[in-house]
Amino acid sequence: MIVDEAEEETKKTCNRHCVTKYFIFTINALLWVISIMFIGVGSWAHVEKDKYDTKGSLTFDPSVLIIVVGVFLFLVTFCGCVGALRENKLLLRIYMVILSILFTLEIITGFVAFFFVDETRTKITSTVKHLVIHYRDDSDLQNAIDGIQKGLQCCGGYSYHDWDHNAYFNCSANTVEACGVPFSCCIKDKINTHCGFGIRRQKTEAEASKDIYTQGCIDRLTDWMLNNLHIVGGIAFGFAIIQLLAIMGSSNLITDIEQAIATNDKLYSDPHM
């Protein structure tokens, strides 16, 4: 009799939270697979890099970043996936706390970026200047900047003149690159790595715009986001909703588990049942 009532109560509890349980499990199972792919791709890229670059710098290493992100995602999704499937309160609590912290940090970052525009712009300007200065110091950083300039069809942070901060491209430098820009700024001749040399000394901005991209990457990215605001906003909103559902679902799942345990304990401990 006691066992039958316990089983009946367990079935009712399952009916109430099965959707939540398998929603959390499914989402985290998919992200778990993605995290494994991140770790695999990052590890492969790091090994391949070491074959050709014996100096290897961790100052800006995309492969290491991918591995770190993959490991972090693996651990978080492990807690969510296994915690939901096995109805483990400890793993679910860890999962819920991590998601809550991440969500809070995202809100704070968005708030700071929106309400402290000048401070944000100053920080971005400082970061861009630092990246430009160290363009030739790290091959990974150089490849990343070249990839961004090619992809966004831009040059420098806010202007192609930002490259004057770099020791090699500075107009007073005693190099063939003096008063120039990297080849990734060139509009047509991207194979010729000398295509941007001396262009800031020889031509006005109107003339230079025929050969290189003169708009800065930050403004270019801002324009792209404004032109695709519905897509960017939709992705951000959808991501936030999934996070909130996962946080609330984990909380509800923990509550259901505790209620089920309390009910079972009561049924088995009550001598009159």
Image (tube, grey):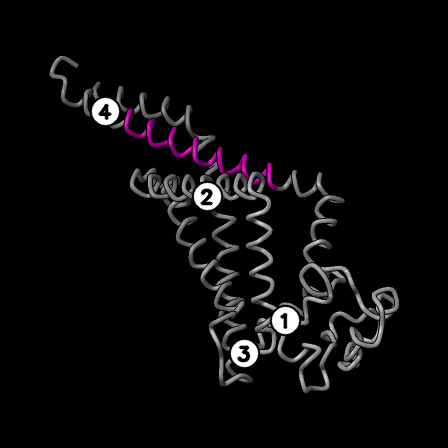
Q: Residue at x 54, y 41 (%)?
A: 110
Number of residues whose C-alpha sits closer than 10 Å to that of mark 2, classed few (under 14), some (14–19) or many (20 or more):
few
Q: Against 61, is 4 above or below? A: above
Tell us which disc is closer to us: 3 or 4: 3
Secondary element at image label 3: helix
Say which amino acid is labelled 2: Leu
Amino acid type at mark 3 = Lys
The residue sitting at 70% across, 47% down in the picture is: 225
Mark 2 or 3, nearer chain start: 3
Q: Earlier in the sequence, mark 3 or mark 4?
A: 3
- Does the magenta run of residues contain 60? no
- Quadrant of the rendered image containing residue 165: bottom right
Crowd class of label 1 (few under 14; some 14 to 19; many from 20; radius 10 Å): some
Mark 1 lies on residue: 165
Q: Which residue is mark 3?
A: 49
| Residue 31: x %, y % from top left | 50, 50
Q: Label 4 vs label 1: CA separation?
A: 67 Å
Q: Earlier in the sequence, mark 3 or mark 1?
A: 3
Tag 1 or tag 2, which sits nearer the N-term? 2
Q: Alpha carbon of mark 2 to alpha carbon of mark 4: how far?
A: 35 Å
* Most foreground residue, 12 or 113: 113
Q: Residue at x 51, y 44 (%)?
A: 109
| C-alpha distance separating marks 2 and 1 | 33 Å
* Relative vertical location of residue 226 with respect to residue 66 in this rendering, above or below: above
Can you identify the residue that label 4 sits on?
A: 262
> Tag on residue 105?
2
* Magenta-tinted stretch: 236-259
Query: Which residue corresponds to the image point at 45% horizontal and 53% vertical from the top-left?
Result: 73
Badge 2 element: helix
